[in-house]
Image (spheres, grey):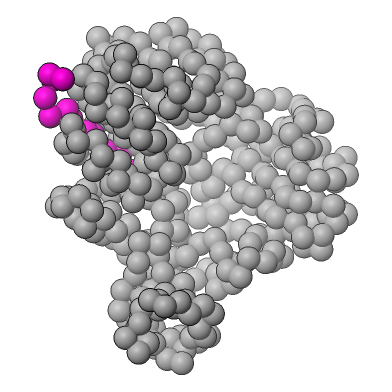
């Protein structure tokens, strides 16, 4: 059946109507006329799949990836990069207006690289193939992914020449000085050692030549198999510089950094403040955080390993609070502690505008002062944001 696409939802899916019912059509854009096949039909909406673009929308561009229409990864590559940025900005504006009643006009900082920017990729195995997950949740064999570098794709294709029948998944991380490879399942790795800094099998290090590292501005960070880093290496400094600028940090500031990971943000701003305290639940990340602080000569930072929701209480005291939570956002206890605090400024780093809007609506003692978007995920609907929240009043 044919459908006219009139808009896009927040997840980058095209929107059409069939008999008055909304139909979500992945990989379509406004202005498209598409022949689609309905793959799911619910009471209030349907989901369709493009079989043919009969008439393309004016902003549609040819995609570079041959797997685009079957892969479940990139979903807005059919827009020019300038249109991708416009979509992301409009998406956040619409969410803030709808859920917070706020009219915002944030600037958006683009990525230097539209492709080959990812420093981590996961390939899934199904005993026969090792590849990416398709729109219908199957493993698809590919020759390479355009979002990662040539050396990552080279390693991936070397792995596929081996016996992958017992491989559940592999993860390749790209550092400035080489690759870290993790495999879950069973795999003969001898031929891969020359291509890797380190190799892990089921979370156990079985080969290591040297540490991997990533430079962010003037700071150097160790990368381990389970450490979390922003996915777009070339744009991390733009994100952290935005945190610096919006935070307006002073030499007298006491800063607490919740969900600090390997301490990357705290270390990045440490030279500008009196002290930083980072809290993170993953013990290996805390180990890396201390290594990173020592390696960069940072002495005014400390870290605590534990669950943020269990560690903080109404005794939380600092001048400025940084929160960079996982996609699910802040838990109710953490929101309550922040609301009851005398913290003047909260710098909220978010990868999900919906949970950000929810948390801001619950942080009733704070007002949004400024928000800046940073595109860390070209070709996808995701966008990172940095928001500054100012306390409405200083008295409890």
| Front residue (pair 307, 254) | 307
- Residue 203: where, in percent of width, then height? 74, 34
Point out the residue furthest to the top here. Answer: 299
- Residue 253: where, in percent of width, then height? 26, 13
Q: Residue at x 47, y 65 (%)?
A: 75
Dominant SS of magenta comes to: strand
> Residue 80, relative to residue 290: is it above or below?
below
Q: Is residue 161 magenta?
A: no
Q: Left or right of 164: which side holds 309?
A: left
Q: Quadrant of the C terminus?
A: top left
Q: Left or right of 353: which side holds 263?
A: right
Q: Which residues are magenta?
A: 384-396
Point out the residue furthest to the bottom here. Answer: 1
Q: Is residue 387 magenta?
A: yes
Residue 60: tell me if it is visible: no
Q: Quadrant of residue 20?
A: bottom left
Residue 379: tell me if it is visible: yes
Q: Left or right of 345: which side holds 195?
A: right
> Residue 168, relative to residue 297: is it above or below?
below
- Residue 19: where, in percent of width, then height? 35, 89
| Front residue (pair 29, 302) | 302
Q: Residue at x 12, y 29 (%)?
A: 392
Q: Left or right of 25: which side holds 289?
A: right
> Residue 300, relative to residue 349: is it above or below?
above
| Front residue (pair 355, 372) | 355
């Amino acid at each position: 059946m044919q459908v006219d696409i009139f808009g896009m939802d927040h997840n980058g899916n095209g929107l059409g109507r069939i008999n008055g019912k909304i139909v979500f059509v992945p990989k379509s854009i406004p202005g498209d006329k598409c022949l689609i096949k309905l793959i799911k039909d619910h009471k209030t909406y349907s989901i369709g799949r493009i079989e043919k673009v009969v008439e393309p929308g004016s902003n549609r561009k040819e995609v570079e990836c041959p797997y685009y229409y079957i892969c479940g990864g990139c979903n807005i590559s059919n827009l020019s990069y300038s249109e991708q940025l416009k979509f992301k900005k409009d998406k956040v504006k619409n969410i803030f207006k709808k859920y917070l009643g706020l009219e915002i006009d944030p600037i958006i900082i683009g990525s230097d690289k539209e492709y080959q920017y990812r420093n981590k990729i996961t390939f899934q195995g199904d005993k026969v193939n090792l590849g990416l997950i398709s729109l219908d949740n199957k493993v698809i064999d590919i020759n390479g992914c355009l979002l990662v570098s040539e050396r990552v794709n080279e390693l991936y294709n070397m792995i596929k020449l081996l016996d992958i029948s017992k491989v559940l998944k592999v993860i390749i991380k790209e550092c400035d000085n080489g690759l870290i490879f993790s495999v879950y399942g069973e795999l003969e790795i001898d031929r891969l050692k020359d291509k890797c800094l380190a190799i892990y099998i089921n979370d156990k290090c079985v080969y290591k030549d040297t540490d991997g590292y990533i430079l962010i501005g003037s700071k150097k960070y160790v990368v381990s198999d389970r450490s979390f880093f922003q996915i777009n290496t070339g744009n991390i400094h733009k994100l952290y510089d935005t945190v610096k600028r919006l935070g307006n940090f002073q030499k007298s500031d006491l800063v607490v950094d919740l969900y600090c990971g390997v301490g990357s943000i705290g270390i990045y701003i440490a030279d500008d403040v009196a002290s930083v305290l980072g809290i993170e639940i993953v013990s290996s990340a805390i180990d890396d955080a201390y290594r990173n602080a020592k390696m960069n000569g940072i002495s005014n930072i400390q870290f605590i390993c534990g669950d943020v929701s269990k560690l903080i209480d109404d005794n939380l005291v600092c001048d400025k609070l940084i929160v960079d939570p996982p996609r699910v956002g802040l838990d109710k206890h953490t929101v309550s502690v922040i609301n009851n605090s005398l913290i003047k400024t909260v710098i909220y780093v978010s990868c999900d505008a919906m949970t950000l809007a929810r948390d801001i609506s619950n942080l009733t003692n704070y007002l949004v002062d400024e928000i800046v978007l940073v595109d860390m995920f070209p070709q996808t609907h995701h966008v990172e944001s940095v928001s500054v929240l100012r306390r409405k009043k200083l008295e409890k």
